[in-house]
Amino acid sequence: AGSLSAAVTAPFDVIKTRLMTDKTGASRMYHNALDCLIKSVRAEGPLVLTRGIVPRVLYITPSVAIFFAAYEAAIRTFRARYATLQ
């Protein structure tokens, strides 16, 4: 699930990064997110939206796996500890 969400949201991350690293003032390259999307795709093609997808998926996947493992362990611990109270 984490890997899929990282891959699906990669295009948004590309746009966000380009907006965050854009210049300020009159020399701005992009006016808003849609403008950034259109200009990026026109200049570099649609595959520009997949830039950085591999590192993004590779760093998110282990953290999601660790989260789910810790969550399941916590649930088991709480159920075992508080099962006698019911």
Image: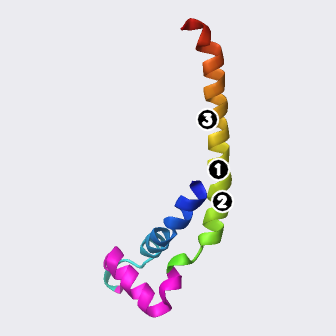
How many other residues sit within 10 Å of disc 1, few (<14), some (14-19) or many (≥20)? few
Q: Amino acid at mark 3?
A: Tyr
Q: Quadrant of residue 15?
A: bottom left
How many other residues sit within 10 Å of disc 3, few (<14), some (14-19) or many (≥20)? few
Q: Is residue 47 magenta?
A: yes
Which residue carries the number 3 mark?
Answer: 71
Mark 3 and mark 2 lie on one chain; the one further toward the N terminus is 2
Numbered disc in front, either 3 or 2? 3
Q: What residue is drawn where x is 52% and y is 59%?
A: 5
Q: Amino acid at mark 1?
A: Ser
How many other residues sit within 10 Å of disc 2, few (<14), some (14-19) or many (≥20)? few
Mark 1 and mark 3 lie on one chain; the one further toward the N terminus is 1
Q: Describe residue 36's horizontal placement relative to residue 78 as left or right.
A: left
Q: Describe residue 15's horizontal placement relative to residue 53 as left or right.
A: left
Spatial separation of the CA atoms under disc 2 and disc 1: 7 Å
Instruction: Classify 13 as above or below 71.
Output: below
Q: Amino acid at mark 2?
A: Tyr
Q: Position of residue 11 (x, y in %)?
A: 48, 72
Q: Residue farthest to the bottom?
A: 43
Q: Which dot marks residue 30?
A: none
Q: Is residue 67 magenta?
A: no
The colour style of the image is rainbow
Quadrant where the N terminus sits is bottom right
Instruction: Classify 57 as above or below 68.
Output: below
Q: How many marks?
A: 3
Label pair 2/1, CB-CB below 8 angstroms: yes
Which residue carries the number 1 mark?
Answer: 63
Spatial separation of the CA atoms under disc 1 and disc 3: 12 Å
What is the magenta range? 27-48
Residue 30 visible at all: no
Q: Which dot marks residue 59?
A: 2
Q: Position of residue 71 (x, y in %)?
A: 61, 35
